[in-house]
Structure formats: structure tokens, C-alpha cells
Amino acid sequence: MEPSSTGLPRPAVTIDHVVAWAREHFGVEGRGVELGSQQDRNVLLTGDDGSQHLAKVSNPVFARAEIEAQNLVMRQLSARGHATPRPVPSLDGDEIVTVDVDGVPHALRLLTFVPGSPLSSTGAPWPGTLAQIGRLAGQVATALADVAHPGLERDLQWDLRQGESVVADRLALVDDPVRRALVEEAVARVRTRLDPVRDELPTQPVHGDLTTDNLVGERDVVGALQVTGIIDFGDAMTSWRVAELAVACSAVFRDEPGQPLAVLPLVEAFDVEVHLTDAELTALWPLVVLRGATLVVSGAEQLAVDPDNAYAAAALDDEWAMFEVPAAQDPEVMTAAIRLALGRPVTAPPVPTLAAPLVPSFTQRPPVVVRLGHDSDVLWDGSWLEDGGSVEQRALADAASDGAAVTAFAEGRLTRAPALSRDQPATVALGVDLRTASPVTLAAPFAGTVTRRDGAVVLTGRDHAVVLRTPQAVVPDGAAMRAGDALATTDRATVWLTAADAVVDRLPPRFVRPAELAAWRTRVLDPAPLLGTPPLPDGGPDDLLTRRTGAYAPLQNHYYTAPPQIERGWREHLIDTTGRHRLDMVNNVTILGHGHPEVAAAAADQWRRLNTNSRFHYAAVAELSERLLATVPDDLDTVLLVNSGSEAVDLALRLTAAFTGRDDVLCVTESYHGWTVASDAVSTSTSDNPRAGETRPAHVHAVELPNAYRGTHRGAGAGEAYARDAVAEIERLAATGTPVGTWIAEPRNGNAGAIGLAPGYLPRVYDAIRAGGGVCVSDEVQVGYGRQGEWFWGYEEHGVVPDVVTMAKAMGNGHPLGAVITRAEIARALADQGTFFSSAGGSTLSSRIGGVVLGILERDGLQEQARVVGAHLRAGLESLAERHDLIGAVHGRGLYLGVELVRDRTTLEPAAEETAALCDRLLQLGVVVQPTGDRQNILKVKPPLCFSRESADFFVARLDEALGG
């Protein structure tokens, strides 16, 4: 077999040797830099003109025919449009020349150099990049299917057809006895699964090493890796076709050790190019394991003969991950997951026929089912983020205090999910926990044989098995049981119901990742029939989305094409139905954080006491109004309460029109103020209304947003320049007989991406408006209420005092509540049109909640937290901008920020497509963030003010990863 069992030290040549040979035989001059290789010597030659070639001195054990075959494979793939190295003819016209190394002839080739970085050096690839790898592997398989050359018929250790013998020959070189035993056991299981299909697997020429080491690429502007070329054809050979895919899959676990199903996009894409047979699907996962095993034993061998090979030493740690991750998975489950992803049929276990109940006493009194997922009514106030196991046991013990309690099958438990997680955590329960007030008998539900393994009792019948983990089990190993025979007497246990063959090699885990559940359900069943509890209901997020689309107007759109089903929240985290927590970067409504216990308690208390409208006399409306007035200058002395920001702006416009007697309004572009007729009329954002410009009423006028980053005027002095333009427009309108009655703007433009109004702008505009008899409205719905940290209200940054202030969103921490604060004389102007009344605005409930929210903001120092944590977050984002050209600017203050993404920092071309892709990638990485702005190229960053430094660091790290690390 080649290579021999003694390993292959690299040819003993220097860079100087290679440089001289390139000059002598190929007429190529260049500076040499050695590149890594396990068994050859590779030298990159760079000429003075920047041209590059790869000089490769092959190990002398490889025959000339093998090297010729490699050249043929390169030419074949190049002819199909793939970027590969190509042989450069020598001065004598030969593609291969012979050089002498200490009396031993070696083959020397000069190849064209394929630019780009190996994918392995650029961090974990996105699912889209993995799909590219799978597609490319399938295209390579198709291109090589009809290639024939004697040099491809190799006796090579990387041929997975010989993998079992390769491992057996080298296993002793693995020093660690525990790891050595793991490899031996894994390969034995591989053999069992390969033997039935071995002769059915198609064979053909393969590249043999399509891993992220041998695929080069570049990151696109969004940070996604784009595969651009294939290198290193040293393992080209004839082998099983599916081995090409198995090798590519194996490399994924170096970058994604926590996600065994990360390979699915790769497999799906390969199958589009090359339809995998049933035999290949059966063999694929065992071959992935076998590839990992051959890597680790071969790596140990290589270091034994070449201990100074740093390349091989560094690779070995990664290779252990490439073995241990797939070897730890149930191969039948992984095969089922692959078949499900490809739309191929899978076989589910039959419904069990039970001759006796598992717990006979449950027939008189069924146990209580304790929910520990998103819909739990025993987990509150983030308690699940403590020691999850202890929280579960307390909940079970409480529920079973006078009877029995069980947990739910296939439930995504909150108790198993960390608050911050890059990867999908294993939250879904395959085992059901049982707890009783006093010991009960657990009986065999069917006849079978008992085995005791890994601390569990396993009863295996004809079609099914029951696994029990309980400290009180006393049934001896090997005992034959009849239905109804006692297995244990206990007050606690964990119970699994599986297919009989699912417990042959290993026992099922307690928890799996949500993405793995469908595959596990081909091996594990709901034990509800054993326990007399309701079965798992059907349906999921996809079913619900269909229902939503059918009944709820699609005009009210949703985030993401395939959104997670969010049913719970805590602080700055959103929680889906699998229990996964995602960092919420967009919810400026819940300013205190999700699920705040004091707000919830106040709402519940007030509902039980009284909820009525503000025409009745009660304390809460006066108390809230006084607290609001305490946050603004004394001239602003009157409060009107409504239900939303749109209503607040609508009312403000009615008030100012009544006070000035003028209808004409001046606003700024790229702004959003609401959805009512009046508030929509002054909303100029095309991202919210693409026809905003053409549908604007004649009495509404707009001036350019004073954006000092990308507007007409930029940099220092932009504010004064924009102010001159605005004043000119104010004067023009007055001269044409349509003087401005109302100016309305946010002091920091929220929907535009936290764009600050350029310094010096707002005071001059306010002066000009008031000089002409108008009044000024500061819309603080998005950016006020302490969110910017240094100022409670955004207008304070500009040193102005508005005539009217509108607010909402944060006021109720998610409860619908809005307000207008103004001067009494402005409010009185509306009296001529009658009294103002809103049925729910200022209700007892809304007023109570509003007062509680303001109190917590003040007591917990959340404005200061916004300042401190916001500055820390902004500094982290600005540090990313130093390394990622896609980030053009970081806007905003406190915890109202915007990360603007551009394709070119000079032209400021908006990177809208990239922004959308980043949002999708960040969702996978545990972060909810969305685009904003008319160009949809700004990440809006406006989390709850309880946002922690830890969460800020997590967001920066995930954004860094998504951008390319």
C-alpha cells in the first residue's frame, strides 16, 4: 500500500534548491516561500512582476504515472471551467522533470498558482459556503466520471475503500489508550454498516481531498466565503464516488464541532449535482467517521517519522475533532437526518402495543405534566437561567407533592438554554422525567430482556425498548421479564421509549438540538402511552406561519423569510418555541426588558382592581402626568395621553394647526412618524412608504435630512450649511403665502439609522420657524426616554426646547401608551373643536403601567446604563470598522445606534443586499437584528436598556464572525 506503513518524510530539499531548479528547467525566476504539505515540498515562487507559480517536488514513492494522472485531472477540471493549478511545460516541453536529491530522483513540476486563501484559514464557513462546497464536489464528481488513467488506480491510504485496514495497521501509533479504543470501536461499527452495501457503491476517479484546506476562496463584501478554486491533487485516485462527499463533510467538523448537522447544506447541494443512491446514503455517515479515523492514525504516523513537521502537528488536533464529532453521533439518526433533508423516505418505529402500564398506579390517577418550555407556567423571571437541572427537579417535586408529575417529550426546555449562544443548544428532551410523592412500582410494559448499561436499565422487547435511569433499579442484568413484572420501585426516573435496535450500540441522549429532533423520532418515540399522558401535538412554526398568512393580512409583514416562532422573552433575550434564546437588538419598545416582573405585577393588579377611561377620577392619571412633566422644562406644563406614537404625532399636528391657524408643515426626509392619515403625511421614509414623495399632501413640505455622513453637506460645518438650506425653504414658503405652522422632526432620525441631526442645525431651524410664527414639535417616540444615555430627551443634545413633545413605545414597556407634552395655551387652542378623549389613552391600567416604567427607569439607573454600555458597545463596533471595510460608519448615542454598511467608503454605495444577508446569518448565530433606512443598509441597534456588557460583547463577536472574523 502507498504510502508505506513507515510514513513519508518530506523530500529533503531547500527553498534555494527549488528556486534554482525552476530557473534551470522552466526559465522562471522568483522569490521562494515554502507552503505546508504532509508529504511533498511546495514552494510558492513570486516574480518581480508579481507573477506566481507553485513548484512541487513530489515524494519519490509516487510513480510517474500517478503524477501524470494528477496533471490529467487538473486539466479536465480546468476545461470544465474550474479554477485549478495547471502544469507549466518545462523549457524542454515536459510537464514533469526529474531532479536529483542525494542520489534519489524526484519529480518536479511547475504549476500555475490559484490565488485565494484556503477556506480553512478564514473561520467557520456560512451554510451558503458549505452549499457551494457540496455543489463543487458534485461537479467534480461529474467531470471526472469518465476520466481514465492507470495512475488513478492507486493503492493509497486515503482511499476509503481501504480505510479499515489503514486504521488497523496504524492504530498502535495512537498513544492515548482511551482515544485508541474509541477509534477501534468506531471502525468496528463502521464495518457493520458498510458490509451490506459495500459492493453497491459506485466507483470512479475522485479528487480525494476536497476539504477546506484544498479549496481556496475570498470573502465577498458581506463576509460570506465564495469558493474560487481547487488545489492539491495529490490524492487523486479511483475510489467510491460517495467518498468524495464524505471527505468534504468530514472537514466541516473542524469549524463546527458543536453542530453535527452543519453538513446538511453541503450534502443537499452535492445531491443536486449527483443523485445519491440509497446505498450511498447508507454509507455516507460511516464513511465520514472512517475518514476521521484514517486522518488521526495517519497523522500519528506522520509525526512518528517526521516529528519536526509543524504542519502535520497542527493538523492533528483538528483531525481529532473531525473524528470525534461524527463518531459520537448515532449513525442511523444522522442517516435519517440526511434522508429527511434530501426528501427521501425514512422509516419510523411502529406504534407500540403495550401489555401493561409502566406505572400501574397511574391508571387510577395520571401524573401532572410539568411544562418546562416556552409555555411553562412554573418558570418565571429568568429563573430557568440558574442551575437548569436543579430548577427542573424543584418544579417536578412541587408538582408531585401529593401525587406524581412528569415532564413533556420533545419539549424545548428553557432550563437547557443559555442566555447567549452562538450555536443551537441541545434543549429538546428525548427522555421524560418522572417524580412521585412516594415510591411507585415501574413495571415492564411488554415482555423482554433486561440489560444494565451506563447506569441505566434497558428492557428490550421484539420491536421496542424502554430505557430507565433510576437509582433504585434492582433488576439483574440478563433477566427475562414478562409484561407487568417489576423493574424498579422508585420516586424518580427518566424514561425513554425507543425502537429495539436503537439501543444496541449506545443509549439515546437526554437532550438533542431542535434540528435533530425529526431524525431522532425515527428511533425514539413519545413515551406518553407508557405513562397515560397526552401525546405530543403535531404542528410547528411552519404550520403557524401558514395560518398567520391565511388569516392575518400580509400587509402586516414579519421579520425573516423563515422566522423562528418567538413566544417568550426575558430582559434583552427573545425565546423561541425550542427554548433557544436570541439576543434582541431591535426592541426599543420594551425599554426595561422583556417579561419585567414589576410591570407584569402592576398590570395584573390593576386589571383586578379597575380599568376604565380617563373621564373618571382616579390617582394614576395625575401621578403619571406629574412624573412626565418632571422630565421636561417648566414651560411644558400639560400632558395629553393616547395609545401610540402615531396617535401622539397625529394629536400634536392637530394641536399645532389649531394654535397657529396654519396647516402647512415642514419635516425632513427619510423620517417616519406614524400610520394615521396626519402622521403618515409627514412621514417621508421610502422604506416604509415607497410612494412617500408622490403621495405627500400639498400642505406638507420636506427639507433634506441633515446627514453629515452621506448627505449633500458632509463633515464639519454641515449643520450650518443644512440650516441655511432649511431657513431658505422656510422663507420661500412664507413668501409664497404658505408660511410654516409646524416643524416636526426627530432630534435623531431613528428610521434613517440613528442619524444625528448635524450640530448647529436644530437651533437655527427652531429660531426661523418661531420667527415666522410657527411652532416646533420634537418627535421623541423612538429616541427619547433615556435611550441615548446622556440625555433623557433627544432635543436636549441640541440645546433647544420644543413647543410640543411626542412620545410612546418605551412609555409602557410594550403596553400601548403614548403622550403629548406641550404648553397649556397650545392645548387650549384645540378646545374650540371640542374636548379631546381617547377611550384607552390615560386609562387606569395605562397610567399605572406608565408610572411603574418611569419609576423603574429612574430607580435602576437605566439611562446611565444606556450611556455606559452604549459607549462600550459603540467602541466595539468602531473597532470592527477598523478591520471590516464594509462598515462605513457607526451612528448614534447610548443604546440607539446604527451600523451603516457600504460597498465603497468613498462613494458610500449602500450595501443593502449584504445587510440583509448579515441579518439572516446573525439570526443563525443567536442575534435578532434588522436593516433600516431608506437604503436598507443600516443595522438598527436599539436593545432594551437592561442590556449588559456581556451581551454587547456577544453581539460584537457575532457581527465580527459574520463579517469574516
Image (tube, grey):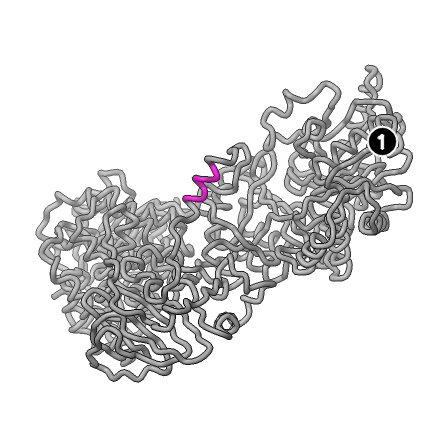
Tell me which residue sits at (28%, 65%) in the image.
498
Front one among 476 and 402: 402
> Was residue 544 drawn as part of the magenta stretch in this picture?
yes
Front one among 490 and 503: 490
Quick one: label 1, few (<14), some, or many (20+) residues within 10 Å?
Answer: many
In this picture, is 191 found above or below 247? below
> Residue 539, position in %: x, y?
40, 48
In this picture, is 700 found above or below 179? above
Tell me which residue sits at (55%, 64%) in the image.
379
Front one among 953 and 110: 953
Quadrant housing residue 721 = top right
> Was residue 805 drawn as part of the magenta stretch in this picture?
no
> Residue 217, position in %: x, y?
37, 48
Which SS does the magenta portion mostly show?
helix
- The residue that mark 1 highlights is 775
Query: Residue flagged by tag 1: what amino acid is it?
Result: Val
Tell me which residue sits at (24%, 52%) in the image.
346
Whether residue 311 appears in this view of the structure is: no
Q: Which image quarter holds the N terminus?
A: bottom left
Query: Farthest residue toward the front?
Result: 364
Residue bounds of the magenta highlight: 543-549
In this picture, is 315 found above or below 848? below
> Residue 289, position in %: x, y?
25, 64
Side (left or right) of 178 relative to 222: left
Q: Secondary structure at mark 1?
A: strand
